[in-house]
Image (cartoon, rainbow, N blue to C red):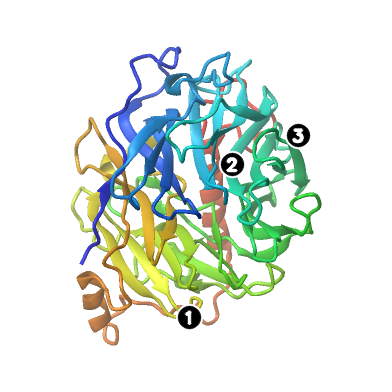
Amino acid sequence: MTDAQFLVSAPSPFTLNCDGMAAAGTLYQNAEVEPHVAVDPGNPANLIGVWQQDRWSNGSSRGLMSASSADGGQTWTRTPLPVSRCGGGTFANGGDYARATDPWVTFAPDGSAYAMGLVTTGGSFEAGSVNAMLVVRSTDRGRSWSAPTTLIRDGEGFFNDKNTITADPFNAAFVYATWDRLVAGDAGGPTYFARTTNGGASWEAARAIYDPGPASQTLGNVIVVAPNGTLVNLFTQIDRVSATVTAAHLDVIRSSDRGVTWSPPARIADLLAVGTRDPQSNIPVRDGSDLAQIAVAPSGHLFVVWQDARFNNGTFDSIAISRSTDNGVTWSAPSRVSAANVAAFTPSVHVRANGDVGVSYYDLRNNTAAASLPTDYWLARSGDGGLTWTETHVATAFDLTTAPQAGGAYFLGDYQALVSRSNVFVPFFVKTSNGDLTNRTDVYAAPAITVTAQNVSPVLQSVFSRRMRAPEIQSRSVPPGFRIDADLRRDVSARVERNMRWRVPAWGEATMQAAPTSPP
């Protein structure tokens, strides 16, 4: 059976021309994408979700919305974040920006919440355009938000991207923000970091904590805090190997002093995603293929998930997972989470208090030769550290072709979210409205009330029944004899190039263009 889903988003509160700029690109009014969610550690009935509201085709959105729930995710109250003009940002309060993207939210142990986003003054990064990382704070569990604090603000020559924010679960005074800062001229993209040590009253100056060097960059930096207090920062490193080859791998760096100093990187695995496409039209899906997600268990074990094509010799992406039992120093060989022999994409990972690991993701197992693109959302659960998995249907098939387009690709977000409250997982995700072009997407929460160890969807039960006589379910391991050959390197390189230019069109060029057209 499919678990109950609760609508989180609502029609856009933003007024016509609220951004104060001439239109550039196609505006998808009422379209919500790229959600994130956090649970109050002091009261798990309190949740806060954030997302992009009113997505533009050429990047970013008119603003970031938040929503708070006091009943475990069944009903929600929505509030704009004052980080853009449409959301109430002004010159006076520090939120005077036209567009916003990359929302992330976290709860501190004292109940304070922090939300973060990337903002820009223009619809593209033309001469004079500004990009910045902003943080807002809530002391009433998301019902209202402070004026923004600017962590970094750059003009031409630099672009800050893919931010996350993490409150220290053991000390409410400490909150950590991280992102990558691209340098014009293909001159690198170090990991940047800022922190507050006084509960958001002030923030230390942003600084680089890892620099991969020229022609390399990090992306998708995200911090978790281990039970012993170690900060573990996960990222994708993208390397320009040659004029025609770009490669990617997953690494972590660690800090034992709350971010003052950091270790050298430890390698997890090569990132061998080829990206998702509509099998009929070949239109790409802008998925999470160049990002990974990380979770920490009460035991201190770390779990990282990502898209990867190694399980079927480069044909399509499955969901991969790796585990570390030594604070991220060493990592297990990747194994496969997703069950069906079809493309799976955009995973999230979370570990419950009892050690159960959950991974949510989209896949195309119900796609047919019809013009639509049926897409399902799933939750896989493991009670043995990722050795075996049970899958639950979170959202039945919806038509992905209704989604907003980003650079010509279907877009639900570079990430979705997964948390838990009490003894259940709570997937937090976007799905389409199946053809309503005035309201293409909405955000949903699925507090998995019906999930038990025995709850397996009818679709998956049918697949399991055929397991021994049909190839629907692959081995969880990499095929024997698998090698990263020239064809796979080419496909991975093409995917990285495509995804990065969706975010920053001048990425990888000799100089940053004066007027690129697609902010992230």
Q: Which residue lies under the disc numbered 1?
A: 384
- Tell me the SS state at disc 2: strand
Cβ–Cβ under 8 Å for marks 3 and 2: no
Badge 3 amino acid = Ala
- Tell me the SS state at disc 1: loop
Rendering coords of residue 240 (x, y %): 68, 48
Foreground pick, 519 / 299: 299
Of pointers 2 and 1, the one earlier in the residue sequence: 2
Badge 2 amino acid = Asn
Of pointers 1 and 3, the one earlier in the residue sequence: 3
- Kindly identify the residue that appears in the image at 44 percent across and 23 percent down: 87
Q: Is residue 107 above or below residue 21?
A: below
Horizontally, residue 83 falls left or right of residue 173, namely: left
Rendering coords of residue 459 (x, y %): 22, 70
Rendering coords of residue 271 (x, y %): 57, 60
Of pointers 3 and 2, the one earlier in the residue sequence: 2
For mark 3, does the 10 Å Cα neighbourhood hold few (<14), some (14 to 19), or many (20 or more) residues? few
Badge 1 amino acid = Asp
**Comparing labels 2 and 1, the label whose residue is closer to the camera:** 1
Foreground pick, 441 / 286: 441
Quarter-wise, where is residue 126 in the image?
A: top right
Q: Which residue lies under the disc numbered 3?
A: 205
- Tell me the SS state at disc 3: loop
Gap in Å between the C-alphas at discs 1 and 3? 42 Å
Q: Which residue lies under the disc numbered 2?
A: 163
Q: Is residue 228 visible?
A: yes
